[in-house]
Amino acid sequence: KKSASNPNLLSNKTMAAIVIGKMVLMPVLGILSCWILSLWWKIPDEIDEPFWLVCMIVFLTPTANNVMVMVELSGSGSKEGIARSIGWQYAVAPVILSLSVTATVGMAMSMGGS
């Protein structure tokens, strides 16, 4: 719920949705889109595993570059809500990021041609 002392803060439900969207759904969509792309686009064997890893890793990291878009979408213009959102993402990052990076490395290796 929104704080009575600061009604501009995003609710906990919104924070959870942001974290799930950025830390769970985005990696899944990124891995799937790279896998589909790998079916149509042949990368040279010398660089295929690192190439796919870099392509997928972009989707895994917590929000940092999208902060201004999130501030605008919150409608409040306050930085406190965005700070909380980033804090929540970094709080779950040790577990979720470890799992998603492990899955991504495995997927990149399986997408490699050698």
Image (spheres, rainbow, N blue to C red):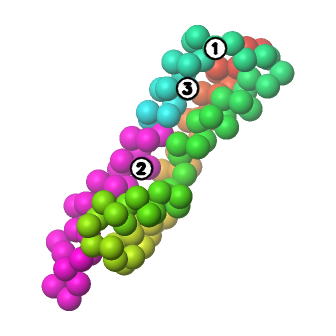
Residue under the image location 83 percent in, 21 percent down: 46
Which amino acid does the dot numbered 2 rest on?
Lys
Looking at numbered disc 3 in the image, what kind of residue is underneath it?
Cys
Report the magenta residues as a range.
1-27
Residue under numbered circle 1:
41
The residue shown at (49%, 26%) is 33
User: In the rendered image, which residue does mark 3 sit on?
Assistant: 34
- Secondary element type, mark 1: loop
Q: Is residue 42 magenta?
A: no
Question: What is the distance, in whole Å, between disc 3 and disc 1 at their CAs?
Answer: 10 Å
Indicate left or right for 49 with 104 as reference: right
Does label 3 or label 1 sit earlier along the sequence?
A: 3
Residue 47 occupies which quadrant of the picture?
top right
Furthest residue toward right = 46
In this rendering, does residue 94 appear at all? no
Q: In this rendering, which labeled residue sits more in front, label 1 or label 2?
A: 1
Amino acid under label 1?
Trp
Q: Are marks 1 and 2 in contact (CB under 8 Å)?
A: no
Which residue is label 2 attached to? Answer: 22
